[in-house]
Amino acid sequence: MVNKRELQKETTRKRLLSTALDLFQSKGYVATTIDDIAVAAASTRVTFYAHFPSRRDIMLSLIDELNQILERGASDTGRSTASALVDAVRAGTADAIGPWLRTQAGRWPAIKPYLLSAAEAAAVDDEIRVVYENWADEVIADIADGLTAAGRYAPETHHMRGELAFGMLDRTAQHWMHHAWDIDTGPELGVLTEAWVKILGDGDAIAPS
């Protein structure tokens, strides 16, 4: 059973995380200081350091939160994985891939501040850049695992197909984050589904309109 002190510590930690995310979004990662976070969270520098050794560490914790939102859990190899993505790629049809992509698009409003903040932090901090790039590689690995499970295409092409599919998804997400087109009525997700089916599926199935 969690005691009152432990509950208070976790509450403070979550408040620092949410405050940092808000500030990274409004001021930018580079311009936000530890003092900014502590003051905005109605806390102190000492309390901040009791939970996070540095600004970098709070950003890394936010990337962990991003994985939770995206339902990426730990795999046997130690990397994060999303079984729903592996299953959709293994099926390789528009009926499987389309709903998975639409589910991810539904999460874009929630993950937008995480992704934009992480991208800015990665541009100025090598350790965060490595973590950010590894996170992308883990998604690509899931796509390759789905192709391997399906026995589709030459194994040596699986990673490259994953790179292409992830690149298209990331570009579509970034486009939405900067232009906010209507996910439900716009043609973008249908086109993205068609492209994924072409490079990951049997290449014949067409995404539903």
Image (spheres, rainbow, N blue to C red):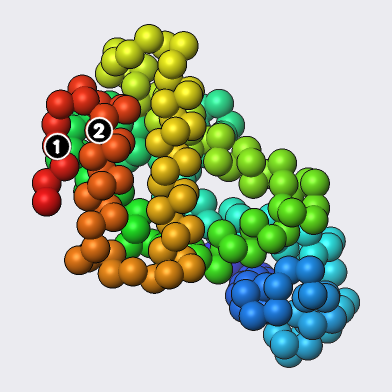
| Residue 90 image-quadrant placement | top left
Query: x, y (%) of residue 34?
Result: 83, 75
Location of mark 1 (residue): 206
**Disc marking residue 62:** none
Q: Is residue 203 left or right of residue 85?
A: left
x and y percentages locating residue 11 in the rendered image:
62, 76
Residue visible at 45% across and 39% down in the picture: 166
Q: Position of residue 83 (x, y in %)?
A: 36, 37
Residue pictured at 28% horizontal, 69% vertical: 182
- Give the structural element (helix, strand or loop) at label 1: loop
To which quarter of the image does residue 133 belong? top right
Residue 113 visible: yes
Taking the spot 46% from the left edge, 11% from the top edge, the residue there is 156
Above-or-below relation of 43 to 149: below
Say whether residue 151 is left or right of residue 30. Answer: left
Q: Is residue 9 above or below residue 108?
A: below
Sequence order check: which comes first, mark 2 or mark 1? 2
Determine if residue 19 is in view: no
Q: Secondary structure at mark 2?
A: helix
In this figure, which residue is indicated by the disc labeled 2? 197
From this view, report whether residue 194 is shown above or below residue 105: above
Q: Amino acid at mark 2?
A: Val
Q: Amino acid at mark 1?
A: Ile
Whether tag 2 and tag 1 are in contact, CB under 8 A, the answer is yes
- How far apart, in angstroms, are the residues tagged by discs 2 and 1? 7 Å
Q: How many discs mark residues in the rendered view?
A: 2
Quick check: 44 left or right of 176? Answer: right
Q: Quadrant of residue 59?
A: bottom right
In the picture as drawn, the residue positioned furthest to the right comes out as 46
Residue 106, percent from left and from top:
32, 62
Q: Residue at x 26, y 30 (%)?
A: 198
